[in-house]
Amino acid sequence: MNPFRPGAGLEPRYIAGRENEYQVFERLIKSAPEIPGNLIISGLRGTGKTVLLNNLKGICDDYNWIHISREYNERFSNEAEFSQAVATDILTKIKGLSIAFDLKEIGGRFFEVIRDSSFTYKDFSVKLGKMSEKQLLEDYFLELLNESAQIIKSADIGGVVFLYDEFHTIVDQKSKRQFPLSSFIGALSQAQRDGAPFVLVATGLPQIQTNFIKAKSYSERMFRVVKLANLSAEETKKAFSETLKESKISFDNKLIDYLVENTGGYPYFIQFYGYFILENIPKENITLDDVKEIEPLLLQELDASFFDARYNKASDSEKIVLHTIANLADEADYSDIRKALKYSHETLVKMVSRLEEKGLLFRPSRGRFRFTVPLFNNYLIRKDKQ
Ligand SMILES: Nc1ncnc2c1ncn2[C@@H]1O[C@H](COP(=O)(O)OP(=O)(O)OP(=O)(O)O)[C@@H](O)[C@H]1O
Ligand SMILES: [Mg+2]
């Protein structure tokens, strides 16, 4: 069986690097709840956020903390859906605890509190619809957290970790009077100050950090931010050699160097290249020359399965903007893009924000634009040459 696993959230056979990220999390758990702390894991698509998040579960288990996992999407970015998701998850865990630890009395009180705050499971969203004030949802969350903290403390466990994936999709929308994010952060912060044993780990695309700061400016002090980047050359080499270890197949050194260079240490590409090579070269000792022979096929497949769909989200004129950036570098100043293109300021601003909405560009800093997908610039340059 092919040991490489290109995909979304697929556990790789060997997880390269990320020791620092595990350590940061472990330290948080060790210090909580006395010194509360939370974690934002931000990174581009395919950098390994979901895999990392899943692997934090093991650390939770080691320290006897329970974990609540959920993958969010835009649908949850309103108060009703979001609070229902959060409450349902907590409720499910607490129910399990009160049964396991025979905490009927405390458990009963908890469910009373939930009912009093108008939580009856089925018509929950209906009742929350009446909550037009941000304060109300924040209060609701605070009560939910504090009451469940009581049960957690009575049960013999350390606390609860929220492992929230794709959390950049949860944003406040002032115009719609929807404040799911600030309500949750606000309540969490207060509950943690009161000693409630919760830790939030939220992963998402790079805008997640800005979302949090916009929602509550003090969230900067509540969260450690870990930016998941591509793996280093050493880690990338290990990703290949360790993954191959239990198979009879080996890559020669020149090939490994080529892979370090051509995958850029991007986790998804490591799995993709490894998988494709093994599928298409039925040999035990694979060399760089073997791979060079199938390179056109490999790039074709990579473009078709990975890049094309992303590229085709852009309109024809937006594509011109993308090619311009690729020819500057994989990141460019707005002013340089404008110079190269000679569009009016208004037109270009519209185009780049549409490209941001389509998830193709983001702003790593003010006035700069970068591709959300690693090595997208190489792809665009390949296309230029076709
Ligand atoms: N540390 C690692 N070492 C080797 N391979 C990895 C590592 N982390 C992730 N991968 C591989 O990279 C690919 C992408 O991982 P994952 O789905 O976790 O990324 P992601 O950041 O969650 O992506 P997305 O933003 O699209 O959800 C998977 O095929 C996974 O097996
Ligand atoms: Mg993911």
Image: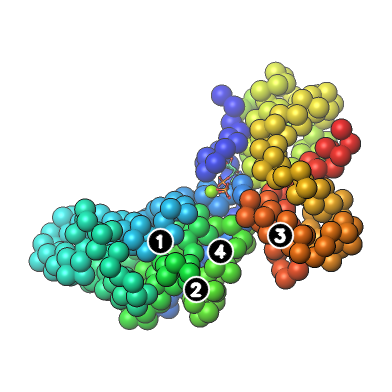
Nearest the eye: 78 or 72 = 78
Residue flagged by tag 3: what amino acid is it?
A: Lys
Q: Confirm or reject: label 2 Cβ below 8 Å from ligand 1.
A: no
Tag 4, which secondary structure?
helix
Relative side of 111 to 62, left or right: left
| Residue wearing tag 4 | 208
Q: Quadrant of the C terminus?
A: top right
Q: Nearer the viewer, mark 1 or mark 3?
A: 3
User: Can residue 58 be seen here?
Assistant: no
Residue flagged by tag 2: what amino acid is it?
A: Ala
Relative side of 307 to 294, left or right: left
Q: Residue at x 58, y 69 (%)?
A: 210
- Nearer-N-terminus badge (3/2): 2
Nearest the eye: 149 or 22 = 149
| Residue wearing tag 3 | 350
- Nearer-N-terminus badge (3/4): 4
Q: Is residue 32 above or below residue 260?
A: below
| Residue wearing tag 2 | 215
Residue flagged by tag 1: what amino acid is it?
A: Asn
Relative side of 210 to 147, left or right: right
The extreme left residue here reads: 105
Q: Nearer the viewer, mark 3 or mark 4?
A: 3
Q: Alpha carbon of mark 2 to alpha carbon of mark 4: how far?
A: 11 Å
| Residue wearing tag 1 | 78
Q: Are marks 1 and 3 in contact (CB under 8 Å)?
A: no
